[in-house]
Image (cartoon, grey):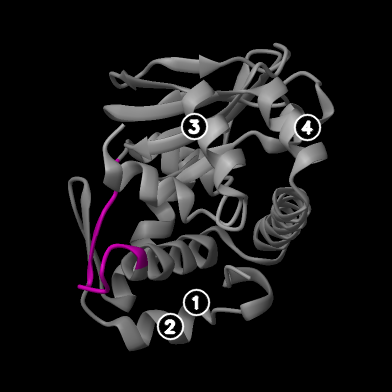
Amino acid sequence: MRPEDAAAIRNLPLFRDAQEETFGDLVRAGFLQRFPPGVVLINERDPADFLHVVVEGLVEMFATSEGRETTISIVRPVGTFILAAVLNDQVYLQSARTLEKSQVLMIPAEMVRAALGTDPAFARAVVTELARGYRRAIKEVKNQKLRSGAGRLANWLLREDVIQGASGVVNLGFEKRVLSSLLGMTPENLSRAFSTLRARGVAVQGAQVRLTDREGLVRFARPDLLIDSDE
């Protein structure tokens, strides 16, 4: 593993305060692998054998039922999945696949569980991470239930613009069908949402979206800290 990758993983809230010995043991026990796009990394209902850390690339978390599929979230570098199943030694509730070429560190689940009993700082970080995950889930429920499709898209574009450097240009990075599923829409509804936002300065050019009137988009989106913040 490159030193800069190890440093980025070390800086994750989950590992930041862990003892040096704990972090070293977890990383040394892990497997750092590269995957092409479209590779399914885990399947829902399978036992949680590893905690996954996305070092490079994008990973889509998704679920299926009765022939239907939905995107739950997108994991970016440097991010982890799926902590709750690993800690409880239960099956995965979601599947995961790469959206682009990705590098993923896989840490054996039993090593993560063992570290809980030997490193109090790591245990506290685990509790905090689970609490943050709960809050993210509640915010997403509010986002889905309290906003129109165009409102969800507008707020996603504003957040994504900030993540990508606030240049006013958002590169989707994945197919529009993934975005529509992520936002709880059909592809047709996503197209209509983009049409609605055209009057707010949103211009789509292939996989690139330009925000030419950010203030107007903010007035339409009305971001809410109780939904859109990372805290």
* 99 vs 126: above or below: above
- Residue at image coords 54%, 82%: 222
Q: Earlier in the sequence, mark 1 or mark 3?
A: 3
User: In the image as oriented, which residue stretches furthest toward the front?
Assistant: 21
From the top left corner, tell me how far across and down residue 196 is, in percent: 39, 66
Mark 2, Cα crowd under 10 Å, few <14 / some 14-19 / many 20+, is some
Q: Earlier in the sequence, mark 3 or mark 4?
A: 3
Q: Which amino acid type is marked by label 3? A: Val
The answer for how far apart the CA atoms under marks 1 and 3 are is 41 Å
Label disc, if present, on residue 27 of the rendered structure: 3
Is residue 83 found left or right of 190 in the rendered image? right
The range drawn in magenta is: 163-173
Mark 1, Cα crowd under 10 Å, few <14 / some 14-19 / many 20+, is many
The answer for how far apart the CA atoms under marks 3 and 4 are is 17 Å
Q: Earlier in the sequence, mark 4 or mark 2?
A: 4
From the top left corner, tell me how far across and down residue 199 is, in percent: 31, 75
* Image mark count: 4
Which image quadrant is residue 61 in?
Answer: top right
- Give the label, 4 or 1, closer to the camera: 4
Viewer can see residue 73? no
* 94 vs 230: above or below: above
- Give the label, 3 or 4, closer to the camera: 3
Which image quadrant is residue 144 in?
Answer: bottom right
Residue designated by label 4: 87
The answer for how far apart the CA atoms under marks 4 and 2 are is 39 Å
